[in-house]
Image: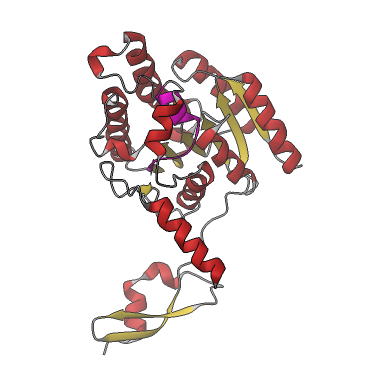
Amino acid sequence: MIQTNDCLRQYPYEQRISNVPTQVKLYFGQFIHSTFILLPPTMSLKDQTVLITGASMGIGAAIARRLAAENATLILFARSGDKLKAFSDELKAEHKDLKIFLSVVDVQDHTSLSTAIANIVQKVSHIDILINNAGLAIGAPSRFPDLEIQDIITMTSTNINGYMFAAYAVLNEGKMKERGKGTILNVTSTTGLEVPPFPGEAVYHASKACQEAFTNVLRTELVGTDIKVLALRPGVVATNFHEQRVRYDKQSYDTFMSGFEPLVAPDVAEAAAFMLSQKDRVSVKALDVVPTAQRSLQVFDREWNSRDKTRNEETMGN
């Protein structure tokens, strides 16, 4: 039998861990090693400086609220100054010591984006984390040749250029490249990996596939640094995003959401916090977070709600 000390020599990192109370047994085939210790808890996000784009509502706002609870320093970018200010006031009321910086920025405009980051970095010294979240889908259910050309330009400029511009500015003006350390979390989508079954998605789908490619290549190009590049892939989330996607057509929205319970933005925020709080040596490179009823982009369990109602009734009956 392999002795415990032999195992520890194979895992020098674990030898350096101290103050970890939990011991676990690890099974490798027929061998049992009884004194291995659990990996350390996840790292704190306290005092990490986090830039979030598209931060005034939806997933961006939920992530900001979640990280405010961790005492992170927040830099919030959005196009709507009024919504951003109102949301910031909410966070300050909930967290008296919260450090928060706001800027009205459209990520399509690289000059204003990089200038805003450079100005804020004079106050915070650098940016530790970028949440690349600003994005949109418009035009459904119109098929590609029936879209307005401006819709195509807006989607690609926001979802593709905007992601690249934000990453570029944070790496340079945000001093992430200079420090050789940090995290870029791109909020992509499951639609970047699968072909959607409904019309009106050609441009949005292509932009999300581009985000996936950009994430993977950027991660590779930053080899030799401690910069993580991650992809968080939400499925269907009940936010303003899907209302905008179908041009606020209630019938189209209700039809799309029928029969199942979508995610809510805090579900995605929890996933983001999990990815960001890993130790330096651990990268959750990509994470899909979807409703249980969303079996794939093609298959939705639209009997979920009826079964869920039955489950709840049975639980209450017991």
- Residue at left offset 38%, top offset 21%: 138
Find out whether residue 226 is within the magenta segment. no
Q: Is residue 74 left or right of residue 288?
A: right
Could you tell me which quadrant the C terminus lies in? bottom right
| Percent of width and height locating residue 188 | 37, 36
Q: Is residue 238 magenta?
A: yes
One can see residue 240 in this view = yes
Q: Going 36% across and 83% down the picture, which residue do you hit?
A: 5
* Residue 44 x, y percent position in the rendering: 57, 54
Left-right relation of 30 to 241? left
Quadrant in the picture for residue 30? bottom left
Q: Position of residue 122 (x, y in %)?
A: 62, 26
Q: Position of residue 132 (x, y in %)?
A: 45, 33
Colouring: secondary structure
Above or below, 45 against 22 in this view is above
Residue situated furthest top in the rendering: 149
**Quadrant showing the N terminus:** bottom left
Position of 224 with respect to 244 (left or right) is left
Q: Along the line of sight, which residue is nearer the eye, 111 or 195?
A: 195
Q: How many marks?
A: 0
**Residue 202 in the figure: left or right of residue 129:** left
Looking at the rendering, the stretch of residues picked out in magenta corresponds to: 230-246
Q: Residue at x 34, y 43 (%)?
A: 224
Observer-nearest residue: 148 or 289? 148
Whether residue 281 appears in this view of the structure is: no
Instruction: Answer with the quarter of the image where residue 33 lies.
Output: bottom left
